[in-house]
Amino acid sequence: MIPSPRRHRLAAAASLVLLACAVHAQTSDPAAPNSPAPIIERPAPSRPGTRPAPASAAAKPASEDPVAQSSALTAELFYEILMGEMTTRSGDPGSGYALVLDAARRLRDGKLFQRAVEIALQSRSGDAALAAARAWQETLPNSRDARRIELQILIALNRIGETAELLRAEVAATSQVERPLLMAVIVRNYSRATDKKLAASVVEQALVDELKKPATGGLAWATVGRMRLNAGDTSGALDAAFKGQQIDPASDAPAALALEMIDPGQPLAEPIVTRYLASNPKASPDLRIAYARALVENRRYTDSAAQLQALTAARPELAEPWLLLGSLQAQARQDGAAETSLKRYVELAAAQKDPKDADDRQRGTTQAYLVLSQLAERRKDFTGAERWLARVDSTDDLVVAQTRRAGLLARQGKLPQAREVLRGLPERTPEDKKQKFLAEVQLLRDAKQYQAAYDMLAQASVAAPNDSDLVYDQAMVAEKLNRLDEMERLLRRLIELKPENQNAYNALGYSFADRKIRLDEARTLIQKAVQLAPEDPFIADSMGWVEFRLGNTTEAIRILEAAYKTRPDPEIGAHFGEVLWSVGQKDRAVTIWKEALLSDAENETLQETLKRLRVKP
């Protein structure tokens, strides 16, 4: 049966009556899910067998007293609430807002105040919403929800200067346990302000009491520091981290803030992190891991490994540090230690069952399998390398695993089969297609089929002349073909395309230094590369080599020794050993070369050096 229009109207009116009753019947403790501070303190539910403590009726808002509510909700007020909802739904939110707000005042009902705010926001009237929130605050001065919603609206209206006292009161009302969450929400919401310097100033004003207390100063100063950092005031943020650590050395918040600012250009940030880690035996493992990652980003691999070794010794049950440590050890050619660390990670990851971390564990386990395969390949255990690759079952890592499998085939003299493996990979994106192409070029380079690699790159460059990856790879293959003028032309083209590409400056400068030509220009080019990547040990190797060619042997030894310590790569070892050999430190040179041979006996630079100097370590 199709209901009549009258039935529709009656049904709508009935639903609105139910809505009005429901709105008034609910407690006046509304959650504000988008408020600038989380609703932190809620009265804990009474335990079975206990009775709530008595409270005087005068001390309670009217809306919290069921008897008062039932007596206060007269027919007139019920009708006013109903009409407010009906008017709002019929397309006149302004009138509906006024009716609901009037009822909220007369009933002293927090839920109705919240409804008035919602109506104002639905009609995109920020000023009306603010007026309702302030009326709520005036009527129910002890309502934290009223204060939070007023804060939220003021921030949304970008009236940041009016929020200091409200925020200060909210912080004071928040329990110590919940302060970290509150501070995180403060930073997130105030960072949306247009005037970020003003926002930082207001937050600092609101936290003025907390900044002075040893129990809260570390967290409060870190919050101020993050606001300053968002405002572009890095030195101010650093100062806040320093003050936070001074007042509360055990707090991890100032160290976490300083960690974000670690950079060669900010030398004062790192000591804040290291002081925290050194003075707190129970320092946050997550912070130490983050510090180790930051060191890797700055190419300080030895320092990063030291942090991870300390963490695995103190907390051997944690999985992630073993993965990071094993990857660094593999990179440093410490293959035995790397294999132990990575297998330990695989064991620990397999024992973990938390579904929240399942994706991270799968990615980590895949990385461990790939590195373990690489370690097996280094010792020419191709069967073992294949076994590790076979354990990779993530479709997201199919390209990486197959690329590695192709490399294994090429190492065994099966280059055609290796190329077929790569060509069979899917091309879901243009980037997939490019990576397949570059992987095939690398197979040809590893097999010393330089002309074939050059032809592939030249053909691809016709279609994409400004692709910097193609230009760089073509330059490197041109060098192998002894087309040095072509190499120089391509590298200068790359510098034009990407003036911040350190590899272009380094490759060109090293080429000049290695051939003992244009040494002053070589030094200038490599110095530019050092400026762009000051912690890169391979660029440091180039700088040490050009200093050696210029006759500055003492400086060359200093630079190369530091580079080799950071990254004991066989090519760096070849250069370091030659410089030592040239000044008569032959025993030390032989020791370095023996280490390099153990790492990679087939390295071309190392083999060429030993042959030229007629040395058999």
Image (spheres, rainbow, N blue to C red):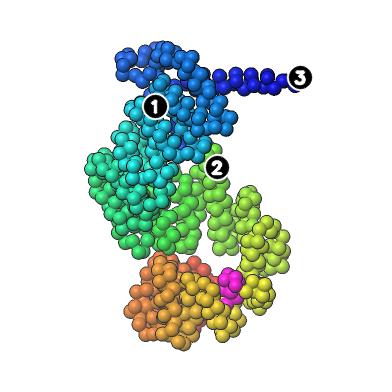
Q: Which residue is mark 2?
A: 358
Three-letter amino acid code of the residue under disc 3: Met
Q: Secondary structure at mark 2?
A: helix
What residue type is disc 2 on? Ala
498 on left or right of 270: right
Residue drawn 40% across and 21% down?
106
Mark 3 and 1 residues: CB-CB less than 8 Å, in contact?
no
Label 1: which residue?
Answer: 42
Residue visible at 31% across and 35% down? 169
The outermost residue toward the right is 1
Check disc 1 and report its element: helix, strand or loop: loop
Whether residue 418 appears in magenta in the rendering, the answer is: no
Residue 377 can be seen in this image: yes
- Depth check: 23 or 10 in front? 10
Q: Taking 39 as reference, is 410 left or right?
A: right
Mark 1 burial class by Cα count in 10 Å: few <14, some 14-19, many 20+: few
Quick one: label 2 or label 1, which is nearer the N terminus?
Answer: 1
User: Which is in the foreground here, disc 3 or disc 1?
Assistant: 3
| Residue 236 place in picture, x, y as percent | 30, 55
Quarter holding residue 114: top left
Q: Is residue 305 in sight in this rendering? A: no
> Magenta span covers which residues?
466-475
Q: In the figure, 335 relative to 177: above or below?
A: below
Main secondary structure of the magenta stretch: helix
Mark 3 or mark 2, earlier in chain: 3
Residue beneath the point at 60% across and 72% down: 466
Q: CA distance from mark 2 to mark 1?
A: 33 Å
Residue 307 in percent (x, y) is at 38, 54
Which mark is on residue 1? Answer: 3
Q: Earlier in the sequence, mark 3 or mark 1?
A: 3
